[in-house]
Image (cartoon, rainbow, N blue to C red):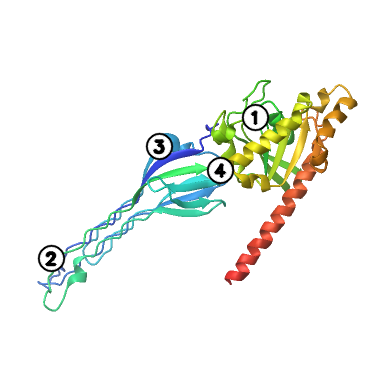
Amino acid sequence: MARFIDQVKILVKAGNGGSGCISFRREKYVPRGGPDGGDGGDGGDVILMADSQIHTLYDFYHQTHFRAENGKHGMGKKMKGRDGEDLVLKVPVGTIVKDAVTQEVLGDLTKHGQTLVVAKGGKGGKGNAHFATPTRQAPRMAEPGKPGEEKWLILELKLIADVGLVGFPNAGKSTLLSRISAAKPKIADYPFTTLEPNLGVVRLWEGYTFVVADLPGLIEGAHKGLGLGHEFLKHIERTRVLLYVLDLLREKEAIKDFLVLKEELRLYNPKLLEKPYLIALNKVDLIPNLEKLEEILKLFSSEKDKIYIISAVTGQGVIELLYALWNIIKEIKEKEENEEEGKVKTLS
């Protein structure tokens, strides 16, 4: 399995244009034929294309220099040189493209098949056939091809998922993902088992699916980059719904965990708190009695409409949680579709 890489720096060089040709007609009965030098071909572009089958920037980790094909030179008989082939580099959906020098965002590839030209090929030079005039009938000049663009780029991947699992290390996020999807994240009874994001597809029934991202656990101070800090937080920005996964075994500390998690998100990006969310109180199978559970639930009284009590190990309460998440996702997607239709109507 390819290593998860979410940021790389690469050099892209578009193809140079081919040079125009200096040539003259040489025919049996035309001893002094006119100029017939053809134009050079255009250099190939470098194009990035989003591909939903790719989930990491690993392919750019070892190979960092990429070059499109040069245009071919022009030839006699006004034959144009062949254009250089474009170089198409496939990247994951969710890749942000920046100019490494200016830090300008050149594009954000958020949909499968979306493309972005990041380096334009040079134009081919004109052959001497273009430079003939009544007073200069045998021009011995032609244009050289233009150089292709060359840029250093930063590619940064921010995962796109419907649901982002938010929780401290060892809260049971990876176990939950393995329960609800075919994903096989590493699971163990110690902090920071998850060192890189895992994606799982939840299938409720035929045609009804959504994507869940299990991301490295937060710690207090994550917004400053502590622990796995920004490696986690940047990936949650694109999720539609947040699911806070809390450890019931921490009892009265569970509410503190919830508030600390929210504060870390706020300090990183206040807009994250505007996302809809639910709370999964996990490990109910290990709570000894109902009285203890009721004590914990009282602490979450202000969030009672968002609380789901589950066991990621036994599956208790998980189905109800999934349907609640799906209802939120469905509502968000319908709103997004209506907004998209509105934009199309406005443009037309």
Local secondary structure at mark 4: loop
Q: Are marks 3 and 4 in contact (CB under 8 Å)?
A: no
Kind of residue at disc 3: Gln
Kind of residue at disc 2: Arg
Is 313 left, or right, of 37 in this rendering?
right
Kind of residue at disc 4: Lys
Instruction: Quickly name the residue at label 1.
Output: 185
In percent of the image, x 36 and y 49: which residue is there? 68
Local secondary structure at mark 1: loop
Q: Are marks 1 and 2 in contact (CB under 8 Å)?
A: no
The number of numbered discs placed on residues in the rendered structure image is: 4
Please give the label number shown on residue 63.
3
Seen in the picture, residue 184 relative to 86 is either above or below; the reply is above
Kind of residue at disc 1: Pro
Q: Looking at the image, is mark 4 or mark 2 nearer the viewer? A: 4
In percent of the image, x 68 and y 62: which residue is there? 338
In percent of the image, x 57 and y 46: which residue is there? 52
Label 1 to label 4, Cα distance in Å?
Answer: 19 Å
Quadrant occupied by the N terminus:
top right
Seen in the picture, residue 143 relative to 233 is either above or below; the reply is below
Instruction: Quickly name the residue at label 4.
Output: 158
